[in-house]
């Protein structure tokens, strides 16, 4: 991505984060204000989608391109179905949609894996991936235990939806360690990007199920962390699915000889 776009992206993230710093609770907002807040919440994602769409003529790997677009669209989709889903089922639908997001992300990571197996899979990578995966399992375990205690008997479907979301998220984080050559610049970026968006889920689940409190930092600090992770993932993916320069095709007029 160009420096100008990254600068614009950073300004949008900072401004929207400041907006949510002072906005009241959702129940206190009018319908128009709530709609505006949802649009601003997805502004970084929409900005990335717009940038990708402008660069569509440079595609060299359409599979990665469409997976990135689907990954971004599913993040925006969470705001679209908000008004059509029953309030009682909204949480389950949100978590299921989150599972779809990480499923696409996992597929995207697998598609980006380099072919040199010995440079990607080694003892250090496996150790780091295992250690990070264990940390995520521990982080999710408190929420999963609470969900099991409260919902397993009354709503088994909801419990398994939460379990599925946690498993796919953890697998995605572990897979990020095997995408690029170990300790390369792209290796660090894809890992940090995946962890940045995944660690936010631990905070949300702990807030909802363990502490039973409003996720006060979700749209401020959480939004900032998520936006940085999103930019890193999209940036690395674009480098692998787009040509570095535009492909220029010269057209010459051919005149018939008399």
Image (cartoon, rainbow, N blue to C red):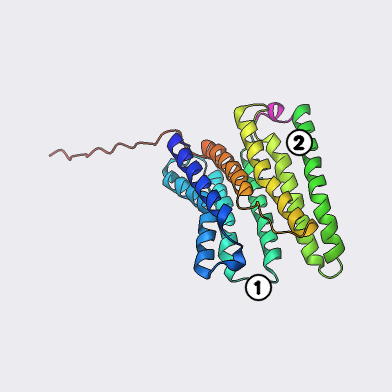
Give the main secondary structure of the magenta stretch: helix
Asked whether residue 160 is drawn in magenta, I would say no
Q: Is residue 148 left or right of residue 89?
A: right
Residue shown at 30% from the left, 36% from the top = 250
Residue shown at 67% from the left, 50% from the top = 102
Up the image or down, 78 lies above or below 58; here it is below
Residue shown at 42% from the left, 46% from the top = 54
Measured as percent of width and height from the top left, residue 246 is found at 39, 36
Q: Secondary structure at mark 2?
A: helix
Measured as percent of width and height from the top left, residue 164 is found at 76, 55
Of the numbered discs 1 and 2, the one sitting upstream in the chain is 1
Q: What's the magenta region?
A: 116-121
Measured as percent of width and height from the top left, residue 176 is found at 68, 38
Query: Crowding at label 2, few (<14), some or many (≥20) Cα neighbours within 10 Å?
Result: many
Q: Secondary structure at mark 1?
A: loop
Q: Is residue 90 left or right of residue 29?
A: right
Q: Is residue 65 left or right of residue 250?
A: right
Q: Which residue is mark 1?
A: 86
Quarter that holds the C terminus: top left
The answer to the question of whether label 1 and label 2 lie on touching residues, with beta carbons closer than 8 A, is no
Q: Which residue is mark 2?
A: 129
Q: On the image, which quarter does residue 255 sit in?
A: top left
Residue shown at 70% from the left, 64% from the top = 91
Q: On the image, which quarter does residue 188 sit in?
A: top right
Query: Crowding at label 1, few (<14), some or many (≥20) Cα neighbours within 10 Å?
Result: few
Cα gap from disc 1 to disc 2, whole angstroms: 38 Å
Up the image or down, 68 lies above or below 189; here it is below
């Amino acid at each position: 991505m160009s420096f100008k776009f990254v600068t614009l992206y950073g300004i949008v993230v900072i401004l929207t984060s400041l907006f949510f710093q002072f906005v009241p609770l959702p129940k206190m907002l009018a319908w128009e204000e709530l709609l505006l807040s949802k649009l601003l919440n997805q502004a970084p994602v929409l900005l990335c989608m717009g940038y990708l769409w402008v660069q569509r003529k440079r595609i060299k790997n359409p599979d990665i391109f469409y997976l990135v677009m689907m990954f971004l669209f599913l993040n925006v989709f969470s705001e679209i179905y908000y008004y059509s889903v029953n309030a009682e089922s909204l949480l389950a639908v949100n978590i299921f949609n989150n599972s779809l997001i990480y499923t696409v992300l996992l597929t995207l990571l697998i598609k980006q894996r380099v072919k040199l197996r010995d440079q990607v899979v080694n003892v250090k990578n496996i150790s780091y991936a295992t250690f990070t995966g264990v940390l995520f399992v521990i982080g999710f375990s408190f929420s999963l235990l609470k969900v099991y205690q409260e919902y397993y008997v009354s709503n088994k479907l909801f419990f398994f939806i939460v379990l599925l979301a946690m498993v796919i998220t953890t697998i995605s984080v572990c897979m990020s360690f095997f995408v690029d050559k170990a300790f390369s610049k792209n290796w660090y970026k894809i890992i940090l990007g995946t962890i940045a968006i995944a660690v936010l889920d631990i905070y949300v689940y702990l807030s909802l199920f363990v502490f039973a409190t409003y996720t006060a930092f979700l749209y401020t600090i959480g939004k900032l962390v998520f936006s940085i992770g999103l930019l890193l993932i999209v940036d690395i993916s674009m480098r692998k699915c787009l040509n570095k320069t535009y492909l220029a095709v010269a057209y010459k007029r051919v005149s018939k000889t008399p």
